[in-house]
Image (spheres, grey):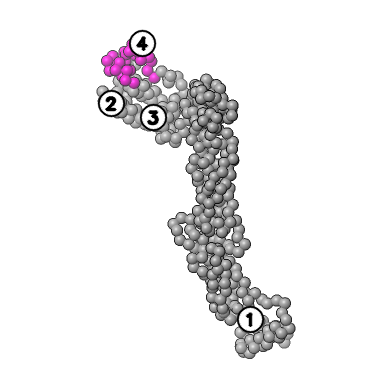
Amino acid sequence: MSKRDYYDVLGVAKGASADEIKKGFRKKAKELHPDRNKDNPDAESQFKEANEAYEVLKDAEKKAAYDRFGHAAFENGMGGGGRPGAGFGSGDFSSAFSDVFDDLFGDFMGGQRGGGGRRAARGSDLRYNLRVSLDDAFAGMQKTINVPTAVSCSACDGTGAEGGVEPVTCPTCSGMGKVRAQQGFFTVERTCPTCSGLGQIIKNPCKVCQGAGRVEKDRALSVNIPAGVETGTRIRLAGEGEAGMRGGPPGDLYIFVEVAQHELFERDGVNLYCRVPVSMANAALGGSIEVPTIDGGRGRVQIPAGSQSGRQMRLRGKGMPALRGGGVGDMFIELAVETPVNLTSRQKELLREFEDLSEDNNPEGKTFFSSVKSFWDGMKG
Ligand SMILES: [Zn+2]
Ligand SMILES: [Zn+2]
């Protein structure tokens, strides 16, 4: 079988630029992706053909040889290019494919570039639970917290190596950071056990950090808690998480806020609710009451005459500040009318008189009490 022209294989013109060649191969690779070609038995061989063509044409030296001698350039060791596509031919198709995709598309494939030659791992994100009072959530606050975390080792400057000796390529994985094992039909990739995926090992690890490049330490951090935080609010402090391994970038610190119950106020979003006891006389006659507000001051609300228990009044702008977008909520005051207890005989006398007057005042028996009374009287009769 005679070999197809490499330029034809990639669908590019003879003398195409390196960029055009790369684009041509990308296009072919996408077309021939195993996921898209479950019913195309030729996809694998077509992909191998394209890969072989690309291996030659992307390499300036091999390309020059191919342009001069054609396929003959790679027979009998001519052209000094070795076998095109070397290191690929017999391998597992899908894993070879994913290598090519990694190489070509990088993040395009979901960003899982693996640990190939990566020497520094990013530190973990940390979570810190912070409980604040409703008053602090209202005003916002600056708080110093102590976070136990891993920080960069100062003895080795985070490199993990004693005396600044450079790390060497991991012999187990040849710097790939991962190892492959054949498991039946599948090729399974695992993080390299020798270097934990870093791709490099340190011959003389730093004595302070045992080569990790970081040490455990309590770190005091000053955190700005913005006004209006709620239970569930997350505050991200970029770069304040764990230090990376061997000089890698640090993770982030997430502060999870929990707002404690207040003894007076119930919160619903930006609004506050509270129950205020009022005397029976006050509720009946009307008047005004003074209530504490979350800002530490006091507010005055008018009680209309004849207010029933459960009636709600609003104090505008006395709620919580909104965390985003500004604005302030309201405070709602619910009246709890109190029945008087521990009456003196004089008070009892007055209440009885009051009751008699009430019946006179409602000759048609409209009060609830008198209608119940007449109902029972009717039953007895
Ligand atoms: Zn390794
Ligand atoms: Zn160290």
Q: Which residue has dot 4 on it?
A: 77
Disc 1 CB within 8 Å of nearest ligand 2 atom: no
Q: Which residues are magenta?
A: 59-85
Q: Position of residue 350 (x, y in %)?
A: 68, 85
Q: Quadrant for residue 68, please give it.
A: top left
Where does label 2 land, which residue?
17
Give the camera-side residue of 72 and 1.
72
Q: Amino acid at mark 4?
A: Gly
Inspect the image, locate mark 1, and give the three-letter code of the amino acid beneath it. Answer: Phe
Q: CA distance from mark 4 to mark 1?
A: 111 Å
Report how far apart the C-alphas of labels 4 and 3 lie in the structure: 28 Å
7 relative position to 181: left or right: left
Q: Secondary structure at mark 4?
A: loop
Q: Determine crowd level at label 4: few under 14, some 14-19, many 20+ residues with C-alpha closer than 10 A.
A: few
Classified by dominant secondary structure, the portion drawn in magenta counts as helix
Q: Residues within 10 Å of mark 3 (few under 14, many from 20)?
A: some
Secondary-structure class at tag 2: loop
Tell me the mark number nearer the camera, choosing from 2 and 4: 2
The residue identified by callout 3 is 104
First in sequence, mark 4 or 3: give its number.
4
Which badge, 3 or 1, comes first in the chain's sequence?
Answer: 3
Label 3 lies in ligand 1 vicinity (Cβ under 8 Å) = no
Residue tagged by mark 1?
368
**Image position of 119 (left or right of 277):** left
Where disc 1 sits, the SS reads helix
Which sits earlier in the primary sequence, circle 1 or circle 2? Answer: 2
Give how far apart the Cα atoms at labels 2 and 3 are.
17 Å
Q: Quadrant of the N terminus?
A: top left
Mark 2 and mark 4: span between their CA atoms? 26 Å
* Residue type at tag 3: Leu
